[in-house]
Amino acid sequence: MMTQPTTERRYDIDWLRTLAFGVLILYHLGMYYVADWGWHLKSAQTSEWLQNLMILSGPWRMSLLFFISAIALALVQRRSDGRSGLTMVRRRTQRLFTPLLFGMFVIVVPQVYIEALSQDLIAPGYFQFWAQYINPRTDLLTEHHSPIGLLTWNHLWFLPYLWVYSLLLIVLRAPLHRLTESERFQRIPPVAAISAVVLVLMLVWLLLRTKFPVTHALLDDWYNHGRYLLVFVFGYLFALQPRWWQFVIERRWVFFCLAMVCYLLILADRNGVFPTLDADVAAYPEVRLIVGTVIALNLWAWIFCVVGFAGFYLNRPSPWLRYTNPAILPWYILHQTLIIVFAWMLKPFALPIGFEAIVLLALTVAGCVGGYAIIQRVNILRWLCGMSLRTVPKSAPHGALAH
């Protein structure tokens, strides 16, 4: 259980980051096979039952990543009070914005190319397509243009959102730390804090969901900002309030039960158990309040559940973390492109869906392992993928061993 002060390293957060990105890879693999959900490329063999499995983590998996990213940011800032805000902004920008640009101009391109090719929108020719893709004034596929042409961040949308939220809290670091160190803040009961964020998320769902559909375009994505920024700010405060963290760890099973109840209700709705619910939500404010509460409680209960179990069982070092901690960002950058490229290559073989999924997962993991092995050995690739540069140790002076 949590006995460490917040200035020490939290290995459970390292584990959670690793496991959350593992779930993300599986989720994107599932998007290739799940029926009725659009994606960049779809298998000829799709499954409806897969929806039931994917909605288990779908509503909260990205929120969990924002939550643990905020915890990590808070702990880093607490350990480096002497570091200037400008230094932290520079490091955060190199860590997040540089990989975003590299991903948009290089890594994401095969996804867009294969998506267009699979829909017969372009003729084969990857490098000819890439030249048009990076040209913001291209006349290729104009109906699919954004304000910057065909350039897109696809699955890397998490990086600009995290970059903006991080810069916001770095700028507000001084008042936030005064707040978190105040006696009034330290005395806030965990139940009150958790109830407040559930209520605020419910209001975000009620007020923003229908007015601002999800776009992942940053500038007009207000419903996503409402929930993700809320989760990020609370994750930051949560990291600096040991009582809240201990409360979540001790009541991990309570949160698990709440999360399962909410999941089963959502699952029941997905499978037609409440056939008039959509009409009732539109007609009755009290029904909207109930549904919004279930949605908000589902997200927070799963986050607190996994944080609680991780804090109880995983707050210890491991040799695995020495590999996964620096590897996570390169794996995240590479994984969706690898899924789409390998899925496109496997399509002509028409393998049985179960066997193909295993092969596709194995190829994706192997591609991430191989890609990271190259990235970590080449300094320019390390920099482009948000990693620190390798330093060559200085050789010992001549005759040093003789002394």
Image (cartoon, rainbow, N blue to C red):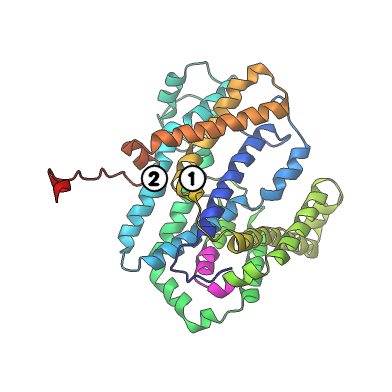
CB under 8 Å between discs 2 and 1: no
The residue under the point 55% across, 50% down is 221
Up/down of 188 relative to 309, above or below = below
Q: Name the residue under label 2.
A: 386
Percent x, y of residue 67: 55, 59
Residue extending furthest toward the front: 402
Percent x, y of residue 322: 45, 49
Task: Between label 2 and label 1, give the one nearer the viewer.
Answer: 1
Asked if the stretch drawn in magenta spans residue 238, the answer is: yes
Q: Residues within 10 Å of mark 2 (few under 14, many from 20)?
A: many
Q: Counting residues from the N terminus, which is met first, the one under dot 2 or under dot 1?
A: 1
The residue under the point 48% across, 45% down is 328
Q: Can residue 54 be seen in this view?
A: yes
The residue under the point 73% across, 63% down is 293
Q: Is mark 1 on a helix, strand or loop?
A: helix
The magenta segment: 233-244
Up/down of 385 relative to 240, above or below = above
Q: Mark 1 points at which residue?
A: 328
Q: Is mark 2 on a helix, strand or loop?
A: loop
Percent x, y of residue 375: 39, 36
Asked if the stretch drawn in magenta spans residue 150, the answer is: no
Between residue 27 and residue 114, name the one nearer to us: 27
